[in-house]
Image (cartoon, helix red, strand yellow):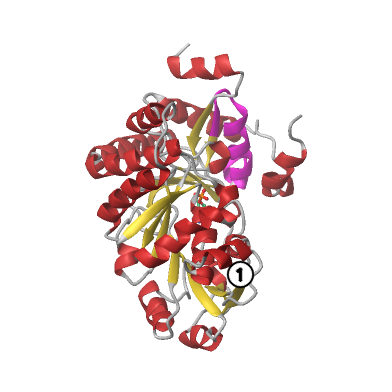
Amino acid sequence: MSSWLEFYEAAGLTPVINVSGTMTSLGASIALPEVAEAMSRILPRFVDMHELQAKASETIARLTGAEAGFVTASASAGISQMVAAAMTGTDAALIERLPSTDGMKNEVIIQMGHVCQYGAPVDQAIRLAGARAVVIGTSTLSLDHHVTGAINERTAAAVYVASHHVVEYGQIPLKRFAELCHAQGVPVIVDAASEYDLKGFLADGADVAIYSAHKFLSGPTGGIVAGKKELIRAGYMQNIGIARGMKVGKESIFGTTAALEAWEKRDHAGIRARERAALDLWLEAASGFEGVTAAIVPDPTHNPLDRLRLSMDPAKAGASVYAFAAEMARGTPAIVVRAHEAELGWIQLDPCNLHDGQARIVAERLSDTLKKAAKGELKEPDIQAMRNRSVTAYLSWPD
Ligand SMILES: *Cc1c(COP(=O)(O)O)cnc(C)c1O
């Protein structure tokens, strides 16, 4: 048995190869060895947590160009904490008053096309702080007047989401959105949880940019908040209030700092080449099947990352992409593909989270599964059940 399978055997867990991207439901990403090492080094020790977060702030500032930063339990927690910060500032009495916002500005503007679902609704992260999410524009069109018309004396902040989850067109670009908000003194909080660009959003006018530590950075589960010092301090200070229930441990702060340091030194070109080799292997494995089209496609938000897009015409390929995805996940190891766009007739394979040797296992399963499809051996799953599985998986848990 190959060594990566031994862990699963010993723990009694299903082995998983993740070609879906960094997914919370699968344990996010492969943490780097230097991250794991930093975390185990700090776990048995006491530290001054303010000092530890101040060190993290230095590293975050260096990588993002921000004045300051801190580590949170997650990007989602970071959104709630920074919305809270925009309402309370550094007033401890107001911080303890949340989620009641009596006496505070409490409206937060967000474009309708940005109200996405990343495992939970983004507007809930706003509302969790006690704020009211003021959704502006329509799903496919927001214009300047939607921003200016929504800003009033109760407006505390605006949230801007940079993500493949948001509507791809019709949204106000960040630079313009920030100009409109800043003209009326409204700070802009950018959710850039899974974006690789650590500097661009702040450079384009964001007052705060928020990232996940456990996505492209290959860190521990955590969030990174970077921005203007006064606002960042107010966000950090929510730890005496609503953020107590979103507590981040010393190991995640230290592990996140290690992940950021590793990012500075990472062999980005080498990783890109390795990912390209996996994509080429899969492209080859998917070729020659009737009704199946495979293509290497760029990331929709321009992260330096490509994926393999596999389209299937059920009438010719013998099965739909739903049946294909279900069959890939049914085998041992389970291979989880990126299927959130299956309604469009394609799934994708993401090469970012592979251990050595896994790309080949995926290639073999890929062509075996397409062969089965061609022979009519795949059963079409219940598509509505597949669509709702993020909820139904909870309803049958822990059985
Ligand atoms: C993943 C993601 C989040 C949530 O990040 P966590 O760190 O897992 O809380 C928020 N927004 C977007 C756009 C995401 O992709």
Residue 301 in the image: x percent, y percent? 40, 59
Q: Main secondary structure of the magenta part?
A: helix
347 drawn magenta: no
Outermost residue toward the top in this view: 1
Q: Which residue is mark 1?
A: 131
Image point (54%, 46%), residue name: 247
Residue 225 in the image: x percent, y percent? 41, 56
Q: Can you see residue 344?
A: no
Residue 273 in the image: x percent, y percent? 26, 38
Question: Is 28 drawn above or below residue 160 in the view shown?
Answer: above
324 drawn magenta: yes
What range of the chain is rendered magenta? 314-335
Outermost residue toward the front in this view: 93
The quadrant holding residue 41 is top left
Image point (41%, 66%), residue name: 231
Question: Is 276 drawn above or below residue 228 in the view shown?
Answer: above
Image point (58%, 60%), residue name: 125
The amino acid at mark 1 is Ala
The quadrant holding residue 269 is top left
Q: Can you see residue 237?
A: yes
Q: Is residue 171 left or right of residue 96?
A: left
- Crowding around mark 1 (Cα neighbors within 10 Å: few <14, some 14 to 19, many 20+) is many
177 vs 76, nearest the viewer: 76
Image point (40%, 74%), residue name: 173
How many numbered markers are drawn? 1
Residue 243 in the image: x percent, y percent? 55, 53
Q: Is residue 364 left or right of residue 121?
A: left
User: Any atom of ligand 1 within 8 Å of the CB at mark 1?
Assistant: no
SS at mark 1 in the image = loop
Question: Is 113 drawn above or below residue 222 in the view shown?
Answer: below
